[in-house]
Amino acid sequence: MAIQDSDAERRNLMLSSIGFILYFSAGGHFVNDQVKIQVVNLAFGKPELLAIFAWLMLFWFLLRYWQTHKTKASSAVSNDIEQVLFTDLRKLIILYVTNRTKLSYEESNGYILGRVEIKLLKWTIHYSLVDRFEKNTEDNTYSYHTIQEEELRLNWFFGVFIIVIALFLACFKNTGFTSYIVPYILFLTAVSIPALQYIYAC
C-alpha cells in the first residue's frame, strides 16, 4: 500500500494508530504538563483534554473506516484466499478431496472442483460428482455430465494445514489483507499498548 494513500478513511486510521503506537511504545510524555506550539506561540495547560480529544478522534477514524469498508474487507480477503486455493494450492485441494471421498479427479464416476465457501470458522469445498468425463488431449478441452453437487468441510490436520498455508500466501501475495485488515491490526495495537502499560503499572 502506498504511503500517499488515496483512501482518506484508511489513511486517517493508520496514521493516527501509528502515532499512538509510537507515543506509548517510546515512552512519550508531556514536559511540565504543557503542550507548546512554537510556530504560533501557543501553549496548552491542560494536556489531558488534548489526550481525550486524541482518543475520541482515533475511535472516530475507526468508525468511519468500518462504515466505508465493512463489506469490502470480507469480500476482498475472501477473493484473495479463493485465488490462492485454486492456483497455488489447487493440487493440495484435489489431494484433500480425493483422500476424503475416495473418488478420482476429472475422471468418469469421479468429481470436478466447484468453488470454496469461506466463512470465519468454516471453509467448505464444493465439488460436483460426474458420471462421464471426456478430455480431448489435442485441444485440451473436456466435456462432462454432472450428477449432483457435494460439499466437504476443510478440517482435520490436513485441512487445517491447507487453511494456514492459504492465509499465509493470501496475506503476502495479494492486497486484500494489507489494504483492509492491517488498519484494524494497527488500531488494536494502538489500544493494547497503553492498556497493557496501565495493567502492569497497577
Image (tube, grey):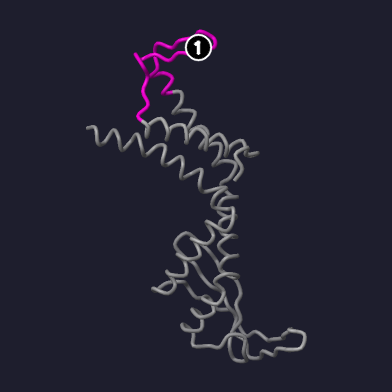
Q: What's the residue at 59%, 70% (across, down)? A: 86
In the rendered structure, the answer to whether residue 129 lies left or right of residue 162 reads right
| Secondary structure at numbered mark 1 | loop
Q: Is residue 46 magenta-colored?
A: yes
Q: Badge 1, how many Cα within 10 Å: few under 14, some, many 20+?
A: few
Mark 1 is on which residue type? Gln
Quadrant holding the C terminus: top left
Q: Is residue 163 magenta-colored?
A: no
In the rendered structure, the answer to whether residue 154 lies left or right of residue 137 reads left
Residue lying farthest to the right in this orientation: 139
Above or below, comparing residue 64 to residue 51 in the picture? below
Residue 44, picture quadrant? top left
Q: Which residue is mark 1?
A: 38
Q: What's the residue at 35%, 34% (across, down)? A: 194
Residue 195, picture quadrant? top left
- Magenta range is 27-52
Above or below, comparing residue 160 to residue 23 in the picture? below
Q: Locate residue 169, reporting x and y percent.
A: 52, 62
Q: What's the residue at 53%, 88% (across, down)? A: 103
In the rendered structure, the answer to whether residue 100 lies left or right of residue 6 reads left
